[in-house]
């Protein structure tokens, strides 16, 4: 593997690791907005957060227990993403060790020695597979309207903020359920996960190209 491919594959490995790790640990996988109630919920693999805006104040609260008690498919996504990060880390460490042990070039035009990167490439493909499984599971489950809305289980920091929410809920006409519409969209954590998946895939492809 020549110097250009060495730099590319290690760069993609490192950025894939960073993006997958940040994606797995952050709370921006999905954002639910109930603007009429001024309630905003963000979902992460390990914490679910809720903001209630009343006046100039924001009642912010996050709980890991809600993520731990989420449906089974949610736990599957967590497991897939953690496994992907572990495989990516192993691939990066093995690749760094392999390249650091490669003999240095003594002359400018000397052909670089063969550097076996097959094992790191295999781990990167495993990271690619598990990240794809995790991201696809989350996307499919949320597209099928799997429930993720937990604000009632998030205790408010200030009682009057929650009282405001319930007062608005009680004032809604029972024949207008559309007034309590929740708008959901994917967040930055989900996007970073896909970016990490793409970079992990590219690093494996580069290893194959360099090998051939």
Image: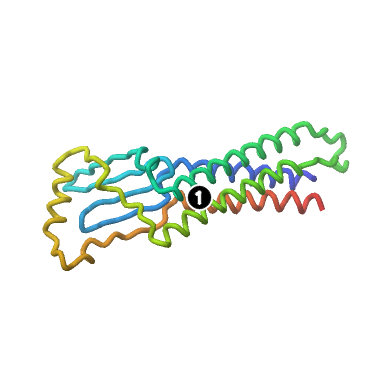
Which one is nearer the viewer's eye here, 139 or 39? 139
Residue at 24% x, 40% y is: 155
Q: Looking at the picture, does residue 168 appear above or below residue 117?
A: below
Q: What is the image's colouring?
A: rainbow
Residue at 53% x, 41% y is: 82
Residue at 74% x, 32% y is: 100
Secondary structure at badge 1 equals helix
Q: Is residue 82 left or right of residue 115?
A: left
Percent x, y of residue 29:
42, 50
Q: Is residue 95 left or right of residue 139?
A: right
Percent x, y of residue 166:
15, 51
Quarter occupied by residue 114 = top right
Q: Is residue 9 left or right of residue 130?
A: right
Mark 1 Cα shell of 10 Å, populated few (<14), some (14-19), many (≥20): many
In the picture of the structure, the residue carrying the numbered disc 1 is 192
Q: Looking at the picture, does residue 106 appear above or below residue 11?
A: above
Percent x, y of residue 55:
16, 48
Which one is nearer the viewer's eye here, 14 or 138? 138
């Amino acid at each position: 593997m020549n110097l250009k491919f060495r730099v590319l594959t290690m760069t993609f490995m490192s950025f894939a690791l960073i993006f997958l790790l940040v994606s797995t640990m952050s709370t921006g996988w999905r954002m639910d907005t109930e603007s009429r109630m001024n309630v905003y919920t963000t979902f992460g693999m390990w914490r679910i957060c809720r903001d209630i805006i009343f006046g100039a104040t924001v009642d912010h609260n996050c709980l890991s227990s809600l993520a731990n008690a989420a449906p089974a498919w949610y736990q599957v996504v967590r497991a897939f993403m953690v496994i992907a990060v572990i495989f990516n880390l192993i691939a990066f460490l093995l690749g760094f060790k392999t390249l650091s042990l490669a003999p240095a070039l003594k002359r400018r035009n000397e052909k670089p020695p063969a550097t076996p990167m097959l094992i790191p490439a295999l781990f990167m493909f495993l990271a690619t597979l598990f990240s794809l499984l995790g991201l696809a599971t989350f996307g499919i489950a949320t597209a099928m309207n799997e429930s993720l809305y937990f604000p009632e289980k998030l205790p408010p920091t200030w009682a009057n903020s929650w009282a405001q929410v319930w007062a608005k809920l009680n004032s809604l006409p029972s024949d207008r359920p559309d007034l309590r519409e929740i708008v959901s969209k994917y967040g930055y954590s989900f996007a970073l996960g896909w970016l990490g998946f793409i970079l992990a895939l590219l690093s494996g492809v580069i290893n194959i190209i360099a090998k051939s």
